[in-house]
């Protein structure tokens, strides 16, 4: 199902007009995301393609993200995906605390662009995400950071809590993903 991300009210974008994401569970314990940013993509800083590998601080540039947690509880996982195909995964015991890096899964990431579209696809096997039941019901927060040629950044998410952009905030986990049907 396709979902539209909203631009943070304190943020603006000259280049990107919309960001959408399709979220599916194509296989048991697998989460697939297909992000599409539309607009004047020449105005977006797109990191050059490289070997897909783990890398920290992807959020400092154009990056797409997903946050996952159970419907109850405070622990959650965060994944960042760069158009370069680099990725990062982190686990948290509660809001921005108890961070562990290098979760036991390697996402598959691919991207493509045209003058009017930037697309990124990511697939995550969720079998090793700690307290998160990969086949159970999940709550997701989906977001994007778009860096423009002038150095400005825009912040996009399914929902924004009050105040500055904060994708870790519990109010951002608004997408309910039902349990996997076996």
Image (cartoon, rainbow, N blue to C red):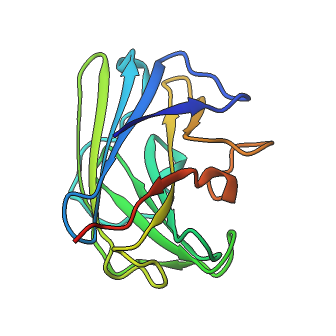
Q: Residue at x 59, y 36 (%)?
A: 155
- Res. 169 visible in picture: no
Q: Position of residue 9 (x, y in %)?
A: 71, 28
The answer to whether 63 appears left or right of 107 in the picture is: right
Task: Identify the image quadrant of residue 92.
Answer: bottom right
Quarter placement of the C terminus: bottom left
Quarter placement of the N terminus: top left
The answer to whether 155 appears left or right of 90 in the picture is: right
State whether residue 100 is above or below residue 112.
below
- Res. 131 visible in picture: yes
Q: Position of residue 158 (x, y in %)?
A: 55, 40
Q: Work out which residue is located at the far right of the displayed protein and give it.
A: 163
State whether residue 49 is above or below residue 126.
above
Q: Position of residue 10 (x, y in %)?
A: 73, 29
Q: Residue at x 63, y 22 (%)?
A: 12
Q: Residue at x 57, y 31 (%)?
A: 6
**Nearer to the camera, 54 or 134:** 134
């Amino acid at each position: 199902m396709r979902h539209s991300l909203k631009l943070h009210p304190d943020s603006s974008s000259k280049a990107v007009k919309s960001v959408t994401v399709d979220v599916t569970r194509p296989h048991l314990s697998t989460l697939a995301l297909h992000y599409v940013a539309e607009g004047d993509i020449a105005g977006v800083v797109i990191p050059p393609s490289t070997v897909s590998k783990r890398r920290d601080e992807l959020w400092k540039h154009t990056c797409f993200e997903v946050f996952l947690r159970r419907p109850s509880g405070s622990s959650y996982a965060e994944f960042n995906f760069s158009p370069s195909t680099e990725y990062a995964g982190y686990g948290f015991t509660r809001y921005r605390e108890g961070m562990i890096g290098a979760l036991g899964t390697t996402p598959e990431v691919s991207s493509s662009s045209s003058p009017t579209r930037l697309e990124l696809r990511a697939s995550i096997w969720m079998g090793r995400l700690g307290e998160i039941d990969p086949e159970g019901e999940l709550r997701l927060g989906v977001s994007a950071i778009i860096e423009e040629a002038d150095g400005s950044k825009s912040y996009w998410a399914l929902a924004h809590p009050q105040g500055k952009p904060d994708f870790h905030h519990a109010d951002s986990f608004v997408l309910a993903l039902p349990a996997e049907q076996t």
